[in-house]
Image: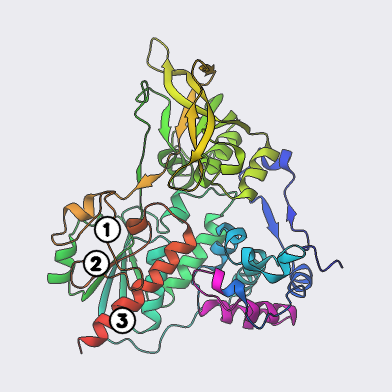
Amino acid sequence: MDVLKKVPVREQDPKVRATNFEEVCLGYNEEEAREEASRCIQCKNPKCVKGCPVSINIPGFIKEVEEGNIEEAAKVIALSSALPAVCGRVCPQESQCEGQCIRGIKGEPVSIGKLERFVADWSREHGIVPEAPEKTNGKKVAVIGSGPSGLTCAGDLAKLGYEVTIFEALHEPGGVLTYGIPEFRLPKDGVVQPEIDNVRKLGVKIETNVIVGKSVTIDELLDEEGFQAVFIGSGAGLPMFMGIPGENANGVFSANEYLTRSNLMKAFRDDYDTPIVAGNKVAVVGGGNVAMDAARTALRLGAEVHVVYRRSEAELPARAEEVHHAKEEGIIFDLLSNPIEILTDEKGWVNGMKCIRMELGEPDASGRRRPVEVKGSEFVIDVDTVIMSLGTSPNPLISNTTKGLDINKRRCIIAEESTGKTSKEGVYAGGDAVTGAATVILAMEAGRAGARGIDEYLSARN
């Protein structure tokens, strides 16, 4: 064994997986996991923990894996994370825990994410479930949204004895985990639902098909329904568009709609009647993880797929692993290109996309080099479907129906980072509803902060 190199992880062959929706990465078995765990040097000052937004005791759980104590490893992770099987699959470990790994200075960092996934999957397969508190404290808390932020907040509060009810607008819980991330990255029945069930087993109730702001308001929850505090974890589900000519044509989608149809409404399955435009030639505009998810979904539905991004590959915001997988599967990257018009036929359907070449200038506020148009470089991509993946913002429904709840210019709720406290008494918020679209683990961190803030608030009211 070369301790400077990771134990390779098994994956589906690219040509095979490009035709199915089964999980790409197959994960470690116990022998592989214990071998990878033995690469950890158990630092006295573990920087990996500081790189983890929810501060999992990473050396602690890895040591248990190395010694074969998988159930103990699961208990260590459970102290900090309610969604380990999810995080092990979708967290950007390369820029967080693994990015800080000391082993990575002279070799490859320890595969922390793959080890977390192994522990979580082993726990599920062996029926290990979290223990609910013996009794509750009689205090009711409402959580809006059942995505990673809401689930984490609810789970932490339930462990402290609170009676928690989650209100979910859609017909299935899970938020972005259910509607946003494709099956081939995050299996719904095999991974997401069991982790949601574990939160339920802590005593959390989940009510679906409840649109807060329409079905019920926050003031009604506090004044009439008996809830003593509310956590808003409603995410950022409002898609952004470019505002270019032709963008309202038939065959133009937001990535949100496209992925929701496929993931939540099972349009990728032949035994479901949900309509989805597969397209023969699809352009996905954007370069983030959601763009990769949309592109790889369209590919599996049978299309030739182009990712159109205005910067170079070095600036792609998507995880390197997702870009690598997309390339392996045959997705074409049209970099340093930006759409300026969607072309249509006489019936209003997309039949092309006019773009212009870009070059990189000086860095902008994000630190990335600013793309600048190259005059006279227009060209047309032959496509029949366009998916816009340009980011999302919070739906204004909650802020519009809640007096005293302050928002910023981007319509994000203003909340204290350390506690989730908003301008309205008894109301806390976190995740994408506060920050705009971000990662699952950052939303979980905000959920934990909100639980701490609510606990402090309600404890002080005794």
Task: Pinpoint residue 263: horizontal percent, then vertical percent.
Answer: 48, 46
* 2 and 1 marks in contact (CB < 8 Å): yes
Residue where numbered disc 1 is placed: 413
Name the residue nearer the viewer: 368 or 163.
368
Magenta stretch containing residue 58, yes or no? yes
Q: Is mark 3 on a helix, strand or loop?
A: helix
- Circle 1 packing at 10 Å, graded few (<14), some (14-19), many (20+), is many
Percent x, y of residue 255? 44, 39
Q: Is residue 224 visible?
A: no
Q: Name the residue furthest right.
A: 1
Mark 2–mark 3 Cα distance, whole angstroms, equals 15 Å
Q: Give the SS element for disc 2.
A: loop
- The answer to whether residue 110 is magenta is no
User: Viewer-nearest of labels 2 and 3?
Assistant: 2
* Residue contact between numbered discs 3 and 1, judged by CB atoms under 8 Å: no
Q: Which tag, 2 or 1, sits closer to the chain's start? A: 1
Residue at the image position 50 percent from the left and 73 percent from the top: 81
Q: Mark 2 points at which residue?
A: 422
Residue named by callout 3: 455
Residue at 23 percent across and 87 percent down: it is: 460
The amino acid type of the residue labelled 3 equals Asp
Amino acid, disc 1 = Ile
Q: Give the range drawn in magenta.
A: 50-79
